[in-house]
Image (spheres, helix red, strand yellow):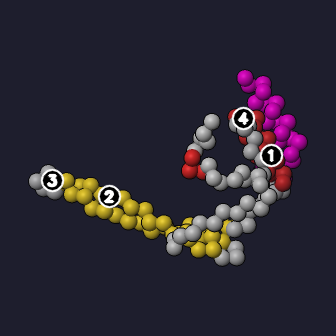
């Protein structure tokens, strides 16, 4: 059976130890910490003159993309985590981890993982 995308057929599996990919292009430069790529977006603006003829003007917009070379710590993507319960749980975990505080009429409040999680699951669960 042929590979799904023949362009990437020769690229080894990303699970191989020490896999490196390097783009050789005058638009790409490498430094110790970053990869910088220059890209020119080309488009056309179409308008009409007073006689109704189409006038096409090419446009260009230069972009510079800078990417860190070091691979960041990888997290976990949980598929199907959407909805009220998933977003409440995710927000409560993040708030607790970052020790979020806020002021109310009663004074300063701090994030409490257990309370937020129970509140989210119980209140959302009973409204369905």
Q: Mark 3 highlights which residue?
A: 53
Q: Nearer the viewer, mark 4 or mark 1?
A: 4
Q: What is the residue that sits farthest to the front in this orientation?
A: 1
Q: Is residue 35 positioned above or below 52 on the image?
A: below
Q: Mark 4 highlights which residue?
A: 80
Mark 2–mark 3 distance (CA, rounded to whole Å): 16 Å
Q: Residue at x 72, y 35 (%)?
A: 80
Q: Mark 2 highlights which residue?
A: 44
Q: Residue at x 84, y 51 (%)?
A: 96
Q: Position of residue 91 (x, y in %)?
A: 76, 46
Mark 2–mark 4 distance (CA, rounded to whole Å): 41 Å
Q: Position of residue 119 (x, y in %)?
A: 82, 36
N-terminal of the pair, mark 2 or mark 4, is: 2
Q: Does 62 sit left or right of 91 as displayed?
A: left
**Which part of the image, by quadrant, shows the C terminus?**
top right
What span is in magenta? 102-128
Q: Does 6 sit left or right of 58 as displayed?
A: right
Q: Does 17 sit left or right of 29 as displayed?
A: right
Q: Mark 1 highlights which residue?
A: 92
Q: Secondary structure at mark 4?
A: loop
Q: Secondary structure at mark 3?
A: loop
Mark 4–mark 1 distance (CA, rounded to whole Å): 18 Å
N-terminal of the pair, mark 2 or mark 3, is: 2
């Amino acid at each position: 059976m042929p590979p799904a995308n023949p362009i990437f057929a020769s690229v080894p599996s990303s699970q191989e130890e020490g896999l490196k990919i390097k783009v050789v292009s005058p638009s790409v430069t490498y430094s110790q910490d970053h990869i910088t790529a220059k890209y020119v977006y080309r488009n056309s603006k179409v308008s009409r003159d007073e006689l109704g003829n189409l006038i096409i003007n090419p446009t260009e917009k230069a972009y510079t993309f800078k990417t860190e070379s070091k691979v960041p710590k990888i997290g976990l993507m949980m598929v199907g985590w959407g909805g009220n319960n998933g977003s409440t749980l995710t927000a409560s975990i993040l708030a607790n981890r970052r020790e979020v505080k806020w002021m109310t009429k009663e004074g300063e409040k701090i994030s409490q993982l257990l309370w937020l999680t129970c509140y989210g699951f119980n209140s959302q669960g009973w409204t369905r």
